[in-house]
Amino acid sequence: VALLVKLSPPGQVFFIQERTGRHGKIFKVYKYRTMRSGEPTNTWTSVNDPRITPLGRVLRISRLDELPQFINLILGNMSLVGPRPEQPQIVEDLKKQIPFYDERHLVKPGITGWAQLNIYAGSLEETKLKLQYDLYYIKNRSLLFDLEIIIKTVYYIFTWKGR
């Protein structure tokens, strides 16, 4: 994957960005680069975002762009399952607009999550729904629920479901 990213439009192999984690702690998340270099990265990404490279589209659909986040797992910034981490400036804006948004930071963010399996949030209204999924996960989290999410994630990756 790293070689393919390096051979695609010029830029770094890895995309490193600050995200908000458990209890609001800021950390750096690692991903394979899926967008053209020099494009703004501090905004939401839409499904058909023109900044995404052709290879980036495939990496996002297959979720291979997420593999470097296992570095975050090893560093202890993220868990395998939990709410997806957001950019600090987006988090600050959403906390002002959505009641209880900060509650999603009671647990470590995850590489995959319940909300991620159910909705792609690219707007304020979709983020409100995503928050409902995140809060449901936090309230009902258990080893069995995590296993269900992991199994569904693997199924979605191999079937490209919902793409």
Image (spheres, helix red, strand yellow):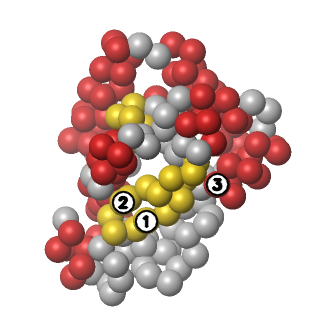
Mark 1 burial class by Cα count in 10 Å: few <14, some 14-19, many 20+ = some
**Residue shown at 35%/46% (left/top)?**
75
Query: What is the CA distance from the residue labelled 2 to the residue labelled 1?
Result: 7 Å
**Residue shown at 29%/62% (left/top)?**
58
Residue underneath mark 3? 88
Q: Which mark is residue 16?
A: 1
> In this view of the protein, which residue sits in the foreground, 136 or 92?
92
Q: Say which quarter of the image contains residue 68.
A: bottom left
Q: Secondary structure at mark 2?
A: strand
Q: Secondary structure at mark 1?
A: strand
Query: What is the CA distance from the residue labelled 3 to the residue labelled 1?
Result: 14 Å
Query: What is the CA distance from the residue labelled 2 to the residue labelled 3?
Result: 17 Å
Residue underneath mark 2? 31
Question: Which amino acid is tagged 2?
Answer: Lys
> In this view of the protein, which residue sits in the foreground, 119 or 73?
73
Question: Which amino acid is tagged 1?
Answer: Ile
Would you say the residues marked 2 and 1 are in contact, meaning their CB atoms lie under 8 Å apart?
Answer: yes
**Residue shown at 33%/87% (left/top)?**
10
Vertical arrangement, residue 53 with respect to residue 109, above or below? below
N-term-proximal mark, 3 vs 1? 1
Vertical arrangement, residue 41 with respect to residue 140, above or below? below
N-term-proximal mark, 2 vs 1? 1
